[in-house]
Image (cartoon, rainbow, N blue to C red):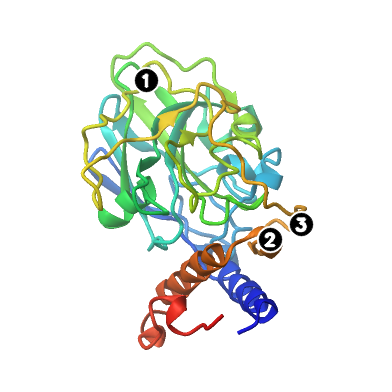
Amino acid sequence: MSYSKLAALVATLASIASVSAHGKVSGIVAGGVYHPGYTINYAYSPTHPPLVAWSVPEDKDTGYVNPGNFSNPDIICHKGATPGELYATVAAGSTVELQWTDWPEPHHGPVIDYLANCNGECTSTEKTALRFNKIGAQGMFDHTNQPGNWASDKLIATNNSWTVTIPKNVAPGNYVLRHEIIALHSANNKDGAQNYPQCVNLKVTGSGTDKLASGTPGMELYKPDDAGIFVNIYDTLPSYSIPGPKLHSGASSPSSSDPPPVSTSTSAGYGSPSTTSSSPGETAPSNEYEPSSSTNPPATPNFSSMTTADLFAWLDMIVAELKSRLGSKTSKMRRHTRDFVAV
C-alpha cells in the first residue's frame, strides 16, 4: 500500500472513530446510596427525573471538549451543562464512586477530581462562579511499553468505575464535584487531547472547617500547551505531569507503592501533579496542525512528520477503538494493523 493510500486510510478511520460514542458517568454512589447519572435520552424528553448529576443536553454524542475550548464554559461541566436538581449526601473523609459507561481502552490518560463550594445552592449556581480545588489526580503508572499504563486503565480494570475521597477537613455545605478523564491518544496533535468533565452536586457533612474559599475557575484549569495536555504518549515518557493546579492541602496523594491494575513491568508510579497549569514537563512534539473551528475536529496525524512505526501505532489505536465500539461485528478483525497492511 502506498504512503498516500495509507494516509488516506488513517484519516478515514480516524474520522469514523471520532463520531463514535466515548463515555460518561452513568451512576454515582455516595454514602452508600446509588444515584443515576444523566442519560442522553433525557435530551429528547420535555422533562426528566431530578438528578444529582448535572444535565448535558448538548452532549448528544457522549463526546468531549477539546483544548480549543478550554476558555469556554463547556470545559467546566461539559457541553451546555446545567446544575443537577438534587444532592448526594456524603461525609467528609468518605468516598464517592463514579460509575462510567464502557470506557474505550485506547483512550489512555489521567483521571482528575475537583471540588468547588457553591456558597449556597448548587442547584441554582452559576458554573462560571465556581472555584475548583483539586482533591485527587492519578496519571501514568509506567511507560515501559508504549503507550503505557494509565489511570484510565485502572478505571477500566475496576469495572469502569472510579473512587474519590472527600478530604476530611472540608466543611459541611453544598459542593460541586468535577470528575474528569482526559484522553491523550491523539494529544500528540495540537488541540488533540479530549476532556470528559462530569459534575455532581454533593451535600458534605461532618466537622471539617475548610470551606474551600479559594480555587481555580473552570475556564482557567488548563492551557492547550500544558505539558500534560499537548503530549505524545507513543513517545518515550520518563514521567508525566498531570495538568491543572496543585493538589489541595487537604487531599491525600496516592502512594507510589500502590500497584497499577494492569502492568507489564515491576515498576509503578503515579504521575506527579503539577504545581501550576503551565508547569514544565515533557518536550512538546513538533507534529501539529492548525486547530479546526469545530468543537470535535477529526484527530488525524500530521503524516509528513510521522514515521511508519508511528503510523502503525496510530492505526492500531483506531482499530482497537473500532473493535470496542462495534463489538461482535469486528470479531473477525485482526488485532494488529501490520497483519493486513503492506507498505
Q: Position of residue 67 (x, y in %)?
A: 65, 45
Real-space CA distance between mark 1 and mark 3, rounded to the nearest whole angstrom: 44 Å
Who comes first in sequence, dot 2 or dot 1?
Answer: 1
Cβ atoms under marks 2 and 3 closer than 8 Å: no
As shown in the figure, which amino acid type bears the numbered disc 1? Pro
Q: Quadrant of the N terminus?
A: bottom right
Q: Position of residue 158 (x, y in %)?
A: 25, 53
As shown in the figure, which amino acid type bears the numbered disc 3? Ser
Residue at the image point whose x is 58% and y is 37% from the top: 283
Q: Residues within 10 Å of mark 3 (few under 14, many from 20)?
A: few
Can residue 37 be seen here? The reply is yes
- Residue that carries the numbered disc 1 in the rendered image: 172
- Helix or strand or loop: what does disc 1 sit on? loop
- Residue that carries the numbered disc 2 in the rendered image: 302
Who comes first in sequence, dot 2 or dot 3?
Answer: 3
Looking at the image, residue 177 lies above or below residue 39: above
- Which is more toward the observer, 133 or 339? 339
The mark closer to the camera, 1 or 3, is 3
Q: Which mark is residue 292?
A: 3
Q: Quadrant of the C terminus?
A: bottom right
- Helix or strand or loop: what does disc 2 sit on? loop
Real-space CA distance between mark 2 and mark 1, rounded to the nearest whole angstrom: 50 Å
Looking at the image, residue 48 lies above or below residue 217: below
| Occupied quadrant, residue 311 | bottom right
Which residue is situated farthest in the top direction here?
Answer: 209
Q: Position of residue 313 (x, y in %)?
A: 49, 65
| Occupied quadrant, residue 299 | bottom right
Residue at the image point whose x is 38% and y is 42% from the top: 140
Can residue 177 be seen here? The reply is no
